[in-house]
Amino acid sequence: MASQLKPTMECSEAEWQARLDLAACYRIFDHLGWSESIYNHISVRVPGEDAAFLINPFGLMYSEVTASNLVKIDIDGNTLDGSTYPVNKAGFTQHAYFHQHVRSAHAICHTHTTAAMAVCASEGGLLPISFYACNFIGKIGYHDFEGITVRAEEGERLLANLDGKHILMLRNHGPVVMGRTIPEMFVQAWSLQRACEIQVATMSMGQPIHVSDAVIAVHQRDLGQAQAPGGPGVADFEAWKRRIDRIDRGWRE
């Protein structure tokens, strides 16, 4: 499919494909109700360029993001593609640190959905009370709230609390989800969101039933058997791209 795509700006074919996938991801997040006015971020490392990243223009809603208006920046947030749009420092400070120090973190998202923020603000964090939650038990780090993330020195503590995992729940704030690809990051974010929604709903009904450690281990062992062909999240992401194409193909511009 990539060979059929024609860049509308000066960039490599690999970068244009990354721009298309990232723009699609923003539109999918918006369609799912995961956007937060002009705030929050999804970023991706430019293929073949370890120190270059794509991120949303600060000031646009997710529904306005397109492949060509994504901003290409370096690890310090400096614009590399001549874009006139600014980048939100509060968002990229944490993204930059993870992109730089977690080699597998090619794609990163940070959201402020009500359910995920509620779980981040609860003392117990994510509980083993649903199918989706069992995907993540033992695979999530937690980081105490230190105020808005604009100080580079917080990066070391963020990384220490991540502790080799790929999801960091920022307490009293919201989750950061990382993946080797945009589809992998997306499907992890989708599953985590479902787990948080179910937890919020279940806790409103009384005492939840906790899944045992032994069953969680079996569940996580067997998860791969339920994966569609193409790699983690690929079938999911392509299905959602088809969905948003039926709504508005403007993200491809």
Image (cartoon, rainbow, N blue to C red):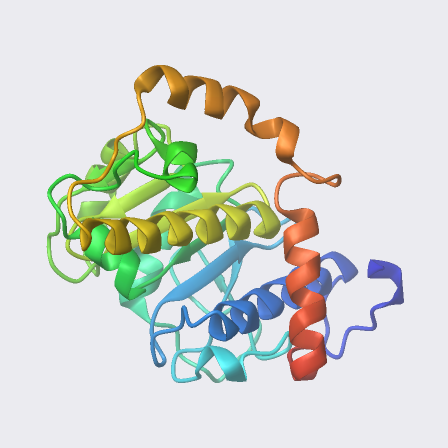
Question: What is the quadrant of residue 161 in the picture?
Answer: top left
Depth order, front residue of 167/76: 167
Q: Is residue 249 above or below residue 141?
A: below
How many numbered marks appear? 0
Describe residue 155's horizontal placement relative to residue 63 as left or right.
left
In this rendered view, identify the residue nearer to me: 112 or 109.
Answer: 112
- Residue 121: percent from the left, percent from the top? 15, 52
Relative placement, left or right, of 102 versus 20 is left
Instruction: Tell me where residue 222 appears, x and y as whole percent.
Output: 56, 23
Q: Residue at x 20, y 57 (%)?
A: 118
Q: Nearer the viewer, residue 229 or 22?
A: 229
Q: Is residue 115 visible?
A: yes
Residue placed most toward the observer, 156 or 173: 173
Q: Which residue: 30% across, 42% down?
A: 168
Residue 16 placement: quadrant: bottom right
Quadrant in the rendering for residue 250: bottom right
Quick check: can you spot residue 253? no
Residue at 36%, 30% in the rendered image:
139
Farthest residue to the right: give it: 4
Quarter in which the N terminus is drawn = bottom right
Rendered-image quadrant of the C terminus: bottom right
Q: Position of residue 66 (x, y in %)?
A: 60, 78
Q: Residue 134's x, y, as percent?
A: 39, 33
Residue 162 appears left or right of 47: left
Determine whether, in the image, residue 117 is placed left or right of residue 121.
Answer: right
